[in-house]
Image (tube, helix red, strand yellow):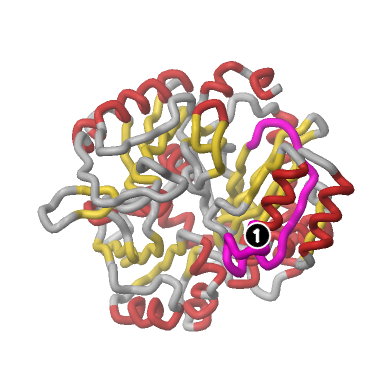
Amino acid sequence: MNILVLGSGGREHAITWALKKSPKTEELFVAPGNGGTALIAENVGGLDAEDGQAVLDFVQENDIALVVIGPEAPLVAGVADVLRGAGVPVFGPDSQGAQLEGSKTFCKEFMMRNNLPTAEYLSTDDEAAAHAYIDKMGAPIVVKADGLAAGKGVVVAQTVEEAHAAVTSCFEGAFGKAGNTVVIEECLTGPECSMLAFVSAGKAYCMAPSQDHKRAYDGDEGPNTGGMGAYSPVPIVTDDELETMIDVMSRAAAATADEFDYDYRGVLYGGFMLTPAGPKLLEYNARFGDPETQVVLPRLESDLVDVMMAVAEGRPDEIELEWADKWAVTVVLASAGYPGSYEKGKVITGLDAANALEDVTVFHAGTAVDDEGNVVTAGGRVLNVTAMGDTFQAARERAYEACALIDFEGKQNRTDIGLRAIRGRDSWA
């Protein structure tokens, strides 16, 4: 079958890579794609992934049997609604389901209605009320822009002054319309952990937990980013915590069937904090995580085309998930200056040498191919260097061995991905 993937990041390269392995895949298209997807599929640079009618026209012209929507923006824009309305199988929820990510207020209200464990909060479009709530609650406290902010609209404020500044920044337009409403939350403590689930017809098929590293610099210092590395599974998660997270994800999936107008079909991403009182939800996202996808999908032994078609067509009872009994670690190589401003067009070397290492796959994120055929930087997060191993330590060492083989001007990366997990739960104290 012919398949179209929407998106341009490392997540979409990983999805395309996994779909490519299926014998059922014939032609693969990625819109707009990146330098890595260009090597295994046909990039469609001129297609606006957020224009539902344009995507539908492309689907009909190219006999596409499945559309996989990678990022959140096309989901919130209702691309899945247009395609499903025309009878096209789509992996990704409609615009209502995507509001679980598109509006943090919508998400928090969903959690509260369904008794899903989460932090206490205030949602408001009144700046004065936001400042008053901060004065009442004190710090540390979390300030979030309500809408989509590319993973950067969250400030974990350690002081009241920092929290006030974050609120002012939102209302002054730092995140555009996304900051017109703010969500201010109790600051939960503990290690963070993500659990993704394939969801269809109110049923959740949970994937192995993973852990992202959001801060830009070693030691979890610096500003939040879209993610600087990840690993799966997560060794510090206890059996009881795993059971709780699976239960929470299952109850959330059932609630989508009870509450939403249309069936939620896609990935539901649960971001958890492993607090002393048990796992609590930080957020839900309506798509695969990035860079979590880059460590979860390499461990999936089931045919991803079969899984995604079963989800898209509302056949959850046919979903079968098999996982490799291995560890996976990914390290993000970023441009100098990220998550702030950065330059593009830097030639990348060493990709073939890194990919030649056993159990290593380099997923492209912010890359492109220049007129001379060179792979060059084209974004803040440039590459996701993923390695598998029989032990956590082996996977981590192999990932960093591959990172050392790759070079481009301004390359930066964290050197401590996974170290806390290796050191144990006490390292989060």
Q: Quadrant of residue 28?
A: bottom left
- Identify whether 222 is placed above or below 92: above
Out of 310 and 33, give the one closest to the viewer: 33
- Identify whether 212 is placed above or below 400: below
Q: Quadrant of residue 182?
A: bottom right
Quadrant of the snapshot with the C terminus = top right
Q: Is residue 179 magenta?
A: yes
Give the residue pinned by disc 1: 170
Q: Position of residue 356 (x, y in %)?
A: 22, 31
Q: How many marks?
A: 1
Camera sees residue 413: yes
Residue 364 located left or right of residue 42: right
Residue in the picture at 47% in, 44% down:
291
Residue 343 located left or right of residue 84: left
Out of 386 and 216, give the one closest to the viewer: 216
Q: Tell me the element at label 1.
A: helix
- Identify whether 413 is placed above or below 372: above
Q: Position of residue 397 (x, y in %)?
A: 39, 21
Kindly give the residue lying farthest to the right in the view shown.
136
- Identify whether 225 is placed above or below 395: below
Q: Position of residue 6 (x, y in %)?
A: 40, 64
Residue in the picture at 39% in, 48% down:
380
Q: Quadrant of residue 1?
A: bottom left
Out of 126 and 142, give the one closest to the viewer: 126
Residue in the picture at 59% in, 37% down:
209
Residue range highlighted in magenta: 169-192
Q: Position of residue 51 (x, y in %)?
A: 44, 77
Q: Residues within 10 Å of mark 1 (few under 14, many from 20)?
A: many
Q: Amino acid at mark 1?
A: Cys
